[in-house]
Amino acid sequence: MAVRLCDVATLLRSGSWAAEPWTGQVIAAMETQLSNGPTCNNTTNGPSNSNTGTNNCSSPVDSNTMPEDSKTNLIVNYLPQNMTQEELKSLFGSIGEIESCKLVRDKITGQSLGYGFVNYVDPKDAEKAINTLNGLRLQTKTIKVSYARPSSASIRDANLYVSGLPKTMSQKELEQLFTQYGRIITSRILVDQVTGVSRGVGFIRFDKRVEAEEAIKGLNGQKPPGATEPITVKFANNPSQKTNQAILSQLYQSPNRRYPGPLHHQAQRLRLDNLLNMAYGVKRFSPMTIDGMTSLAGINIPGHAGTGWCIFVYNLAPDADESILWQMFGPFGAVTNVKVIRDFNTNKCKGFGFVTMTNYDEAAMAIASLNGYRLGDRVLQVSFKTNKTHKA
DNA sequence: TGCCATT
C-alpha cells in the first residue's frame, strides 16, 4: 500500500476537513476516531494483551511463556450487526493477504454475534491491521482489533454479571475491585440511556474461567469499600443462549432493518431528503417506497444490481489507498467494497476510486456529506457511479 | 443481563 492509515489520519487531522453544519456530527465522529487513532479505551485492547508477541506498547517478546500464540490470527469485536463475513474480509483484505476469515454467527438464527476472526498470511499484516483498524468507527460501533488468544475451553464462559454496585462506581473502580482475581479482558458498567447514570449493573470478563470463579467466591455478597450494600457477582448469561421468544422475534426481523421504528425512519428520510436537496439542489422522489434497485433510473445507476450502490470518488491524491475510503465511508453504513484505481506501472492512485455500499439511504447520506470535502489540498467529488465517469 | 471475546 502506498500510504499507511496513520499517515492518512495525520493528513486528516491537519485540519483539512471543513465540516458543514449538517454533517458536523458524522464528521465529528470521524475526526474523533481519526485523531484518536487506535484506541486503548477498552481494558485490554488489542496487543496490550500479555500473550501477544508484538504490540504497540513496546512490551518485550516472551516466546518462552507463550510459544503457541499466533501472530497472524486476529479477533475483531464490536462489529455492526449487519456486517457480513464478506465485508469483514473485504475490510481486512485491504491490509494484506488473508489466509482465512470467519464471522461468528448464532448457530440457530444465523445472526452475527458481532465478532469474527481474521487470519493473515503475514504476521506483519496482522500487526498493521491492529495498528490501522483497531478503533475504526463503523456505523454505531467502534471495532476492536486484537490478537486472538489460543482457543481453549479455559477461556470460555469467563464473563461475570455484577449487580448492586454503588451508582457512583466508575468502570475503573470496578476493575480495581476485580483485578486481584485475574487478568480482565473487558469491563463495562451499564448506564441509563436517557440520564447516563449508572444502573448499578456491570460486566467483567476475565481471561480465564477459573479467575472468574475465584472472583465470585471472593466478591459475591461482599460490600465494596465505602459501599452500604453488598454486590451480587455471578456468571453472565451467554448472549447466544436466548429464549424461544427472543429467537422468534429475531427471526421476524429483517436483517437489513436498522432503524427502530417507522417514526424514526420517517424522520431519517426527511432529513436525508433535505441533505440531498442541499447537495444537489433538486427534488427527488422517495426510493425507499419501492423495493429494489430498478426504481432509480435517471437518478443514479448502481454499479451492480443486487450487490449494492456503487459510489464514485474523484480527486483522490496519488498516494491514496483503500484505508482512507473505509475511513471516510464506514461511518455512514454498510460498506461492502472499496477500490482505489491505480496506474499499472507506477501503482499510484489515478485520482479516483469506488465504494460500494449496501443500503441506499446510507450511500446517499455518505455522498451528501462527503461530496465537496477537502482532503489535504484536494476537494473531493463524491457521487453515485454513472455509466460515464466524466462530466460533460 | 450487554456498545455480543474464542471459530
Image (tube, helix red, strand yellow):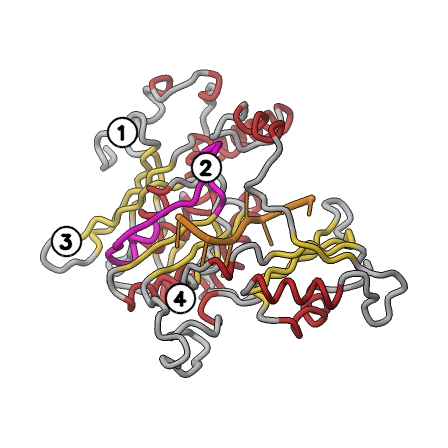
Q: Which residues are magenta?
A: A91-114
Is label 3 in a helix, a strand or a loop?
Answer: loop
Q: Which mark is residue A107?
A: 2
The subunit letter for the residue under badge 1 reads A
Q: Nearer the viewer, residue A206 or A197?
A: A206
Q: Residues within 10 Å of mark 2 (few under 14, many from 20)?
A: few
The subunit letter for the residue under badge 4 reads A
Q: Which residue is mark 3?
A: A343
Q: Which mark is residue A304?
A: 1
Residue depicted at 29% across the width and 42% down the height: A354
Residue depicted at 47% across the width and 36% down the height: A111
Q: Which mark is residue A385?
A: none
Give percent across and percent down for residue A121: 24, 60
Of labels 1 and 3, earlier in sequence is: 1
Vertical position of residue A61 compared to residue A47: above or below: below
Q: Which residue is mark 4?
A: A131
Residue depicted at 38% across the width and 50% down the height: A326
Of labels 2 and 3, earlier in sequence is: 2
Q: Amino acid at mark 4?
A: Asn
The quadrant of the rendering that contains the C terminus of chain A is top left
